[in-house]
Image (cartoon, rainbow, N blue to C red):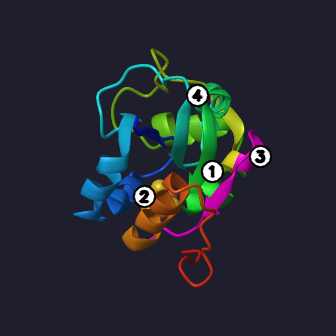
């Protein structure tokens, strides 16, 4: 029997949700018996593949690159999971939302800098006006709140989805 394909994606987040994923420790071996991790910070893959069964998305959608990537992921994924408060509500990344991106970059890279008083331009994706939760731009199949979600909750979610069951998260997750 062929293995399922699981991907993880790091948009505008701190990587804490991925750290929590790694904290599932030996349960990761169980997951890897049933599925291959085909994309994300944990593996060396350049292009998001086709026909992915489950994708865990960490982080808010904050830039044009985030938006393009998450739209591509949605087209190529059966089940898309918003993992963590930044993906679910936009959380910390949305703290910049009251400021126009131009003003934000001026504050960070000009007023707040000791050297090189100019915003970076080369290879830096344009910011969206607002950092937004994933479900504002694509359909999300499951929300898993937490900052970060606990490792056992992540293990439960992945295991249930790989068994084609909808995870019942009552009592297993909370915001913050
Ligand atoms: S939800 Fe918390 S742990 Fe996860 S990316 Fe956001 S700030 Fe980091």
Label 2 or label 1, whichever lies nearer to me, is 2
On the image, the x and y values in percent for residue 108 come to 49, 41
Residue that badge 3 annotates = 136
Disc 3 secondary structure class: helix
- Residue 25 position by quadrant: bottom left
144 is within the stretch colored magenta: yes
What is the spatial separation of the Cα atoms under label 4 and label 1, in whole angstroms?
A: 21 Å
Residue that badge 1 annotates = 96
Label 4 or label 1, whichever lies nearer to me, is 4
- Up-down relation of residue 102 to residue 174 (above or below): above
Disc 1 secondary structure class: helix
- Mark 3 burial class by Cα count in 10 Å: few <14, some 14-19, many 20+: few
- Mark 4 burial class by Cα count in 10 Å: few <14, some 14-19, many 20+: some
What is the spatial separation of the Cα atoms under label 2 and label 1, in whole angstroms?
A: 20 Å
What is the spatial separation of the Cα atoms under label 2 and label 4, in whole angstroms?
A: 18 Å
Disc 4 secondary structure class: helix
The answer to whether the residue labelled 4 contacts the one labelled 1, judged by CB atoms less than 8 Å apart, is: no
Q: Magenta residues?
A: 135-150
- Mark 2 burial class by Cα count in 10 Å: few <14, some 14-19, many 20+: many
- Residue 165 position by quadrant: bottom right
- Mark 1 burial class by Cα count in 10 Å: few <14, some 14-19, many 20+: some
Mark yes or no: residue 95 visible: no
Q: Tag 1 or tag 2, which sits nearer the N-term?
A: 2
- Up-down relation of residue 25 to residue 137 (above or below): below
131 is within the stretch colored magenta: no
């Amino acid at each position: 029997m062929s293995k399922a394909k699981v991907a993880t994606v790091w948009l505008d987040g701190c990587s804490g949700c991925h750290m929590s994923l790694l904290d599932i420790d030996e349960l990761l071996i169980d997951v890897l018996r049933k599925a291959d991790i085909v994309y994300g910070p944990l593996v060396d893959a350049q292009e998001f593949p086709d026909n992915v069964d489950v994708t865990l998305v960490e982080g808010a959608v904050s830039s044009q690159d985030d938006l393009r990537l998450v739209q591509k992921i949605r087209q190529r994924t059966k089940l898309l999971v918003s993992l963590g408060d930044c993906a679910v509500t936009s959380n910390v990344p949305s703290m910049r939302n009251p400021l126009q991106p131009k003003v934000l970059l001026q504050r960070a890279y000009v007023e707040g800098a000791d050297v090189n008083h100019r915003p970076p331009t080369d290879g830096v994706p344009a910011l969206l006006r607002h950092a937004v939760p994933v479900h504002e731009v694509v359909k999300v199949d499951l929300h898993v709140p937490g900052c970060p979600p606990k490792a056992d909750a992540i293990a439960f979610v992945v295991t249930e989805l790989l068994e084609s069951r909808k995870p019942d998260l009552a009592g297993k997750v909370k915001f913050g």
